[in-house]
Image (cartoon, grey):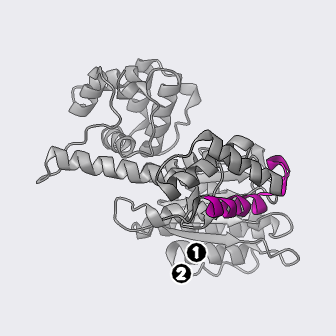
Amino acid sequence: MGYLDHRFDPGTPAGQYVVERLGSRYFEKQPIQELALAAGVQRDQIFWEQKASQLWIDVLETAWKQQRLRLLFIAISQDAGADRIFQDLAAEPTDHEVVEIPPQSGQSQPVVAGAVAAVTEAVGAMFTAAVLWDDVPLIDRTDLRGHVQRMLGPGGRRALLVRGPSGAGKTHTRQFIRYVSENAVPPNGTKAKVSPVDAARRAGSPIDVRELADTVARFVVGEPAPNFDPTAQPQTVVWLFKDWLVAEVAAKGDIQDCWLVFDGFDRTTATAAALQLVMELAQSAAVRDLGPVRVIVLGYDDPLSEPDQALVEPLRHPGDDDVKAFIRAYATRAQGISPGADAVDAVFDELVSDGGPISDRLLVELGPSAFALCLDVFGALP
């Protein structure tokens, strides 16, 4: 088995490199479709009307699911102009965790390999953290961790919808994204900014579309939204603002990576036009019309109008095994060694004895309680 026999992950340094190299050579829909056809990939499962960098991610992931990833690279390798790396991948008989990335001028191969290994280790630790910073517990959320990882990098996804009722832990999404943004340095060397747009306290005084547009404009391009015709209908303002923002992002060209997190938006906290604008922005981001802007919608509850290419996380309540995994991860980080199953079970039993079954407890209480107990048993985190 080789690299192509494993699940393709666009969030790793190797995956990002592969996507960037493919996108730089095959950036039009027709040749990409021809390669997929040659490999026998079922093309009706791919959304073709998107930019090459995102399209290649979907093609590669679909090929892997259909067990045709190696066949796809064989088809690519037969192109006379294909990079040597794709020919090597197609012929690779052994197991590799990362693609061998050619060194830049002045760098030795061991230096590059060491750098890739270091980045891979750091990224892995960041996305599996049970405790964010030193005191914010994050139990489970496997889907969230994977989705946010897929949203990093120039070829990453651009929209995430998080479904779940009040109290299900949607706000933890904001904390995790902020944690990742503070610890992940993208290729341009600058950190992304996380801009939460919180309407949770607007019940009784819903945010309207003009106020929301102005807030978004200041976050994304650093200037207020235009003064649209005051007689224009709210739905018209939605389209006017969306078109203006897309044009501004394209004109500026070098705006900072931005994660817009819409939280608490529903019919009691926002007008119908404001809710429509949130979804229009998610759609525009998903198809990469907003450049490096990512849009995350917490509490999304309309499956019939999901934006194309948006990632979706249906929230679920943690189970017993998820809490035990949290206890094990905390102990390992605190003491430098993984605890035995008996030690984990003892702490878990005490947690249940003090507060009741895991399934009956709200996340707002469960996380801090588990953290406090682990702190008492295993000591403070280094």
Question: Circle 2 is placed at which residue position?
Answer: 223
User: In the rendered image of this protein, does residue 96 appear above or below residue 134?
Assistant: above
Q: Which residues are magenta?
A: 355-377
* C-alpha distance separating marks 1 and 2: 6 Å
Q: Tell me the crowding category of disc 2: few under 14, some 14 to 19, or many 20 or more residues within 10 angstroms, Cα based.
A: few
140 and 99: which is toward the camera: 140
Q: Is residue 186 above or below residue 329?
A: below
In this view, 57 is above or below 367: above
Q: Quadrant of residue 298?
A: bottom right
Residue 284 placed where, x, y %?
58, 56
In magenta stretch: residue 367? yes
Inspect the image, locate mark 1, and give the three-letter code of the amino acid beneath it: Ala
Q: Quadrant of the N terminus?
A: top left
Residue denoted by label 1: 217
Residue at x-position 58% and y-position 81% = 224
The picture places residue 195, in percent across and down from the top left corner, at 58, 71
Q: Residue at x 30, y 23 (%)?
A: 94
Whether residues under marks 1 and 2 lie with C-beta atoms below 8 angstroms apart, the answer is yes
Which residue is pictured at 80% across the width and 75% down the height? 201
Find residue 33 and report its image quarter: top left
Q: Earlier in the sequence, mark 1 or mark 2?
A: 1
**SS at badge 2:** loop
